[in-house]
Image (cartoon, rainbow, N blue to C red):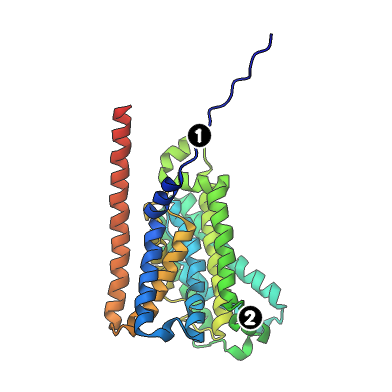
Amino acid sequence: MSTAAPTAPTTPKPSAGARVRKILQARETGVIMAFLVVLAVTTAINPSFLFSKDGWRDLFLTPSILVVLAVGQAIVIITRNVDLSVGSILGLVAYATGRMFVDTGLPIVVVLLLAVLLGVGLGLINGALVAFAKVPALVITLGTLYIYRGIMMSWAGSDRINASDIPRDLLSFGTSSILGIPSLAWISFVVLGIAAYLMGRTRGGREMYAIGSDPDAATLYGLKKTKRTLLAFAASGGLAGLAGVLYVARYGTISSGAGLGIEFEAVGAAVIGGVAIFGGSGTIFGAAVGAYLLMTINRGLPILGIQDFWQRAVVGLLIIAAIVLDKVLRERQHKKLLAERDAA
């Protein structure tokens, strides 16, 4: 007598309508729509904003460095931390890259590799101070923001690296394009793809979301919180180092003001893109779209005749709106879960 093997219950696939509703309800969809509206309005007023060779090129080139920084920032914020030192790391790594070209004569590839490793090392310092000293990341990275910038200013003084000191091949790469899209933008796309895969498809990425969602529960569950925190800050530092390399390739000239203030744009891009400032939710893709929206607003508002003060105010309002929206959505989700529990 044979018995039939029990079959595992299958989860019904969502219908096409359900998938469409899920896409429309995603935070990233709203950011993309806002980006398209800004792009359409600005282009309608000044068609060269998009439909010119430089306009099309700037659409992708201008956000490329910020996208790389925003990706790293999103990883850190998802773990319920923040990294305010990325602008200083960018500047310090950019200047160190220039000095290596001037002083050592090392091959380009070796210099770029050392530059990124320097960024990883600076990020690990942040991570170690946060993970082992148990001090809030806001305080730690605010301190290292000034320390790294101070080291750079002490090292550089009034000196500056000029484009004539940078290898011509690197400068050519910084201005080159592939299929009509700047090479630096392709670099940011690759970074975005790798980070999105690691955070969304791997166990390590899911653990970072769990740690950011509820650190105490993650500790009780046995997740390696210290290791994940170190990795998050190392990734942020490494990407800031890569952003420093891209800065050298694009601008060629490096002074002590390189990357000054860009850390706040990186945080703003991640938050506007739907990464919860309280950790645990949001996507890498959303942070990148937030960077595109932020930089397109910065380029578009002067064309609309809006004064510089109001340009900054608009960006500030976007960040506040994103944080308030995130809080409202969290409370709504919490109430929904309580209602489902009570009904069960």
- Is 335 drawn above or below residue 165 in the view shown? above
Looking at marks 2 and 1 on the same chain, the residue that comes earlier in the sequence is marked by 1
Total count of labels: 2
Choose between 137 and 180: the one closer to the eye. Answer: 180
Choose between 207 and 305: the one closer to the eye. Answer: 305
Q: Is residue 122 left or right of residue 168?
A: left
Foreground tag (2 vs 1): 1
The residue to which callout 1 is attached is 11
Residue ID at (59%, 65%): 190
Q: Is residue 258 visible?
A: yes
Q: Amino acid at mark 1?
A: Thr
The residue to which callout 2 is attached is 173
- Is 242 drawn above or below residue 199 in the view shown? below
**Quadrant, the N terminus:** top right
- Is 148 drawn above or below residue 305 in the view shown? above
**Quadrant, the C terminus:** top left
Q: CA distance from mark 2 to mark 1?
A: 49 Å
Q: Amino acid at mark 2?
A: Phe
Question: What element does badge 1 sit on?
Answer: loop
Q: Which corner quadrant of the image does residue 40 belong to?
A: bottom left
Q: Which corner quadrant of the image does residue 175 belong to?
A: bottom right
Residue ID at (53%, 43%): 224
Residue ID at (30%, 28%): 343
Q: Position of residue 169 (x, y in %)?
A: 68, 83
Contact between labelled residues 1 and 2, with CB atoms less than 8 Å apart: no
